[in-house]
Amino acid sequence: MTTKPITPKPITGRQVFFVMAGAFSIIVAVNLTLAFKAVSTFPGLEVKNSYVASQNFDRERTAQLALGWQVAAQIEGDRLILSIDDKDGPVENVAIDAIFGRATHVADDRTPVFTFDGSDWVAPMEIGPGNWNLRLVATAADGTPFRQRIPIYVKAQR
């Protein structure tokens, strides 16, 4: 018996077109998905009008630096601990307005309710692991606002 040699079918222009169209369709679909997620999960606005905000920036920064505050935040168990110290020690007479949330989206934003325990400001807070931000506005007794974003990284429990 003789066998007939197998000859492959030639690639046609139609096949090349469908392969290329499929590949580019996947690329476009992934790009659109990523663009949608980027726009829908991050508000992107820090201030409504950056020009107006810039007019007072230097004056507000100088007043904030004049307070001489050292600010730090950390998570211990189920508590958010905020330390505000000046040259005389812990600062007690201050109005705190803060938002605690994820660094990438606003869905998990919370408003902590701080109480002064004699040395630090403490708020109950149950959070998961990851990158978090405490966006703090603390107003001194003389009315000077102190603004700072404090990044906090929470490790996963093992």
Image (cartoon, rainbow, N blue to C red):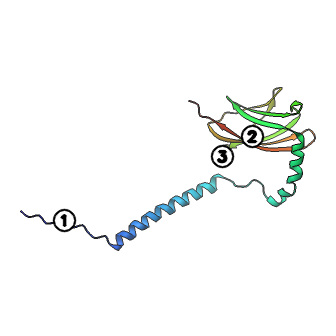
Residue displayed at 8% across by 64% down? 2
**Which secondary structure lies at badge 2?**
loop
Q: How many marks?
A: 3
Ranked by sequence position, the earlier of labels 2 and 1 is 1
Q: Residue tagged by mark 3?
A: 107
Residue displayed at 87% across by 54% down? 56
Residue displayed at 49% across by 61% down? 27
Quadrant of the image containing the C terminus: top right
- Choose mark 1 or mark 3, whichever is in front: 1
Q: Residue tagged by mark 1?
A: 6
**Which secondary structure lies at badge 1?**
loop
Residue furthest out toward the right = 142
* Distance from the alpha carbon under mark 3 to that under mark 2: 12 Å
Quadrant of the image containing the N terminus: bottom left
Ranked by sequence position, the earlier of labels 1 and 3 is 1
Q: Residue tagged by mark 2?
A: 111
Q: Of the residues shown, which amino acid type is indicated by label 3?
A: Ala
Residue 85 in the image, given as x and y percentages of width and height: 84, 33
**Which secondary structure lies at badge 3?**
loop
Q: Of the residues shown, which amino acid type is indicated by label 1?
A: Ile
User: Considering depth in this image, is 131 or 47 the residue closer to the camera?
Assistant: 131
Residue 140 lies, with reference to residue 21, above or below; the image says above
Whether tag 2 and tag 1 are in contact, CB under 8 A, the answer is no
Image quarter for residue 143?
top right
In the rendered structure, the answer to whether residue 12 lies left or right of residue 96 reads left
In the rendered structure, the answer to whether residue 112 lies left or right of residue 53 reads left
Residue 36 in the image, given as x and y percentages of width and height: 59, 58
Q: Residues within 10 Å of mark 2 (few under 14, many from 20)?
A: some
* Distance from the alpha carbon under mark 1 to that under mark 3: 61 Å
Residue 16 in the image, given as x and y percentages of width and height: 37, 69
- Residue 36 appearing in the image: yes
